[in-house]
């Protein structure tokens, strides 16, 4: 890693895009980076073993674009390792992440950098909309105003995630002080890093909706088994000091309830009932409250969609 400049009024910025078999989408992701109103010093695409022509699309884009675009190889260990590889290859004072299947508003970096300079923040998130990959229709909007409350609800599976993979901008010097993205996690790696980062007290939220989060069937978190396995690992990290046993019990009970309901809906009734039983033994309230939180999230996304759609930043 090269020496990095200080974050001044006009910090340099590196964009890191982890990629695996994203030929359908990576061209659009690269185009939205190139169209940013804030200058991008470099865009680093980290290929994690794609076999669908993704790398050729990136090479063609790099050959035609005036934006510095580099394709580097990861070792096939998943998105966490790919993002860490991109960070190691970058040289900007700020680092922004974009998943290869998501898109940015053209003013995303401009508005987030301005907020970070104004507040001396270490990490900045922004609002995002969820859209269906097939139809392109917006299915919900997520905006966070109270970062601490939102983070606890995210950990407890009672609220929305912050979309770190495509919304976050980090100060590079701060990111280098963290453990980075955990290579052992296929999902939830963003949550583990945000939890660690929040201990610094230097997280801020740009409330404008500046990211389009693509919803499609190939996403890992759509697999309840993968999600449950990785969230248990996240909880081992989050609660390693044992300082909040009541909150830990609530979180693990919610996870068991989440797995149980989804297993039953997928036809694995016996396994699902077993998970619900574990949830009930941990905290009997969660078997009832978790579905209510899920309904509330869905309603909240829908309401924000109605209120915010059509008012996004130009």
Image (cartoon, rainbow, N blue to C red):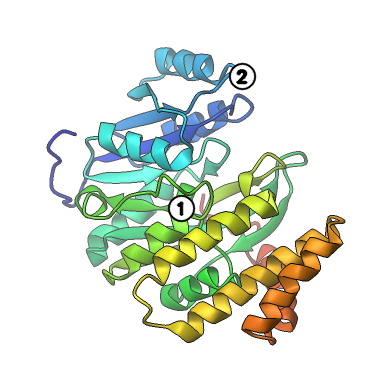
Q: CA distance from mark 2 to mark 1?
A: 25 Å
Q: Position of residue 140 (x, y in %)?
A: 68, 60
Q: Position of residue 90 (x, y in %)?
A: 26, 34
Residue 52 marker: 2
For discs 2 and 1, the disc positioned in front in the rendered view? 1
Q: Secondary structure at mark 2?
A: loop
Could you tell me which residue is drawn at 56 percent across and 75 percent down?
251
Mark with earlier residue (2, 1): 2
Residue 139 occupies which quadrant of the picture? bottom right
Q: Does residue 303 appear in the picture of this structure? A: no
Could you tell me which residue is drawn at 49 percent across and 86 percent down?
246
Residue 258 vertical position relative to residue 146 in the rendered view, above or below: above
Residue 283 occupies which quadrant of the picture? bottom right
Residue 189 marker: 1
Q: Does residue 66 appear in the picture of this structure? A: yes
Q: Is 270 on the left-hand or right-hand side of 28?
A: right
Q: Position of residue 247 (x, y in %)?
A: 49, 82
């Amino acid at each position: 890693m090269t020496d990095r400049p200080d974050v001044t009024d006009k910090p340099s910025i590196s964009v890191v895009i982890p990629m695996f078999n994203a030929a359908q989408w990576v061209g659009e992701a690269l185009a939205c980076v190139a169209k940013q109103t804030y200058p991008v010093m470099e865009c680093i695409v980290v290929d994690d073993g794609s076999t669908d022509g993704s790398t050729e699309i990136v090479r063609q884009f790099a050959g035609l674009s005036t934006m510095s675009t580099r394709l580097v190889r990861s070792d096939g260990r998943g998105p966490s390792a790919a993002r860490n590889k991109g960070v190691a290859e970058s040289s900007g004072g700020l680092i922004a992440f974009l998943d290869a299947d998501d898109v940015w508003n053209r003013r995303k970096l401009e508005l987030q950098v301005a907020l970070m300079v104004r507040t001396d923040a270490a990490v900045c998130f922004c609002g995002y909309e969820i859209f269906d990959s097939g139809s392109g229709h917006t299915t919900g909007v997520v905006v966070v105003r109270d970062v601490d409350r939102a983070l606890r609800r995210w950990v407890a599976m009672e609220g929305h995630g912050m979309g770190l993979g495509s919304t976050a901008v980090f100060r590079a010097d701060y990111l280098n002080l963290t453990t980075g993205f955990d290579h052992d996690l296929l999902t939830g790696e963003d949550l583990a890093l945000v939890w660690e980062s929040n201990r610094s007290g230097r997280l801020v939220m740009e409330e404008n909706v500046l990211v389009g989060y693509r919803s499609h069937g190939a996403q890992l978190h759509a697999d309840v088994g993968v999600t449950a396995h990785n969230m248990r690992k996240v909880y081992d990290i989050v609660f390693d000091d044992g300082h909040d046993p009541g909150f830990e019990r609530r979180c693990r009970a919610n996870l068991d309830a989440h797995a149980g309901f989804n297993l039953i809906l997928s036809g694995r009734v016996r396994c699902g009932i077993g998970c619900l039983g574990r949830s009930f033994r941990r905290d009997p309230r969660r078997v009832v409250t978790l579905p209510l939180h899920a309904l509330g999230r869905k309603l909240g996304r829908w309401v924000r969609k109605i209120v915010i759609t059509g008012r996004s930043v130009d």
